[in-house]
Amino acid sequence: MSVLLKILPLAAAAGVAVMNGDALKKSLDVVDKVRSAATSGVEMQGIAEALARDFVDDKNLPVEDFGGWLKENMRQKDGRETRDKSKDPWGTEYRLTVDVPKNGFSVLSAGPDTNWKSEDDLNYFYSLTGIEGKNAISTELAKRAQSQASKQGVSTAAGTSGSTKSSAPGTSSKKAVATSPPKPAQSAEERLSNNIEFRKKRAATGEAEASFDLAINYFTGEGVEKDYVEAKRLLEQAVKNASTETLREKAKIHLENLNKVLNK
């Protein structure tokens, strides 16, 4: 197998920031399921980046109707719908949680066993600090997210204090829910183009995760022309600025493989 073919599966799975690897390997003993896991990881990354772009515009996250937001915004390349886009490849609805202490949000999947709070759950966390600074999440959004998480039985780090009292229908608490009109659905090409531009802006500031993701785009030619030299530069930047050892090691592996390609 060529070096190029070896690196592609790593690139496909790179979008999942938190994954219990050993448990996932035990559960995914069928090739089709492995492909689904990689697909879900890339999809979760795209969802997170689209949410981040919307957040820049309106400082809001669709915590009350995440499924509706997904159906409205996620479209296949050819326009056909082969599955419900509010659900992961295994048919379970994606979830959205907010983490105030970490200043970001997570896109969650129940994984191949379709059961929440099990070892193969997938979690893509996105930090808003790089695009909106510290304390990007408002108190109102944190309370709404905490309320929604309670309904779903999801643990959350919303960071709000005090108890939430239930109120009768028609009281002012209902007004606290901010809603915005749905945005026009984007095609797969538009989504990819927007994601590339978003990554370029973040990578220009030195952000390691964006540098890594953009390097993979330049290596594979997805959304941009193949440019191994630029991919190498971005991977080196990711290695240098990585805030976690996991990201640093992933970038090192890809950089080593890329150097083999360049030195052929």
Image: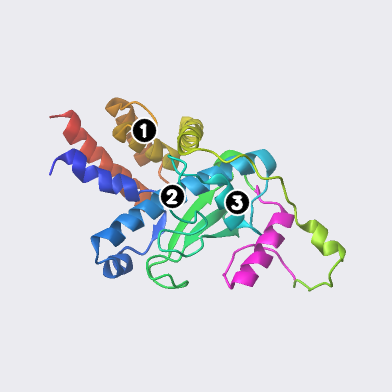
- The residue where tag 3 is placed is 69
Q: Quadrant of residue 161?
A: bottom right
* Most distant residue in the right direction: 171
Q: Is residue 107 left or right of residue 9?
A: right
Front one among 244 and 156: 156
- The residue that appears at 27% across and 70% down in the rendered structure is 26
Amino acid tagged 2: Glu
Q: CA distance from mark 3 to mark 1?
A: 32 Å
The 10 Å Cα crowd at callout 2, few under 14, some 14 to 19, many 20 or more, is many
Q: CA distance from mark 1 to mark 2?
A: 22 Å
Tell me if residue 100 can be seen: no
Q: What is the span of residues highlighted in magenta in the rendered image?
A: 135-162
Distance of label 3 from label 2 (alpha carbons): 14 Å
Q: Quadrant of residue 139?
A: bottom right
Mark 1 / mark 2, whichever is N-terminal = 2
* Residue 154 x, y percent position in the rendering: 57, 70
Name the colouring of the figure: rainbow
**Who's the residue at 40% across and 44% down the image?**
242
Q: Which type of secondary structure does the marked residue at label 3 adopt? A: helix
The residue identified by callout 1 is 234
Q: Give amino acid for label 1.
A: Leu
**Mark 2 — residue?**
43
* Crowd around label 3: few <14 · some 14–19 · many ≥20 (10 Å): some
Secondary structure type for disc 2 = helix
In percent of width and height, residue 19 lies at 38, 60
Where 166 falls versus 143 (above or below)? Answer: below
Q: Does residue 225 show up magenta in the picture?
A: no
Query: Disc 3 residue type?
Result: Trp
Quadrant of the image containing the C terminus: top left
Residue at the location (82% across, 72% down)? 167
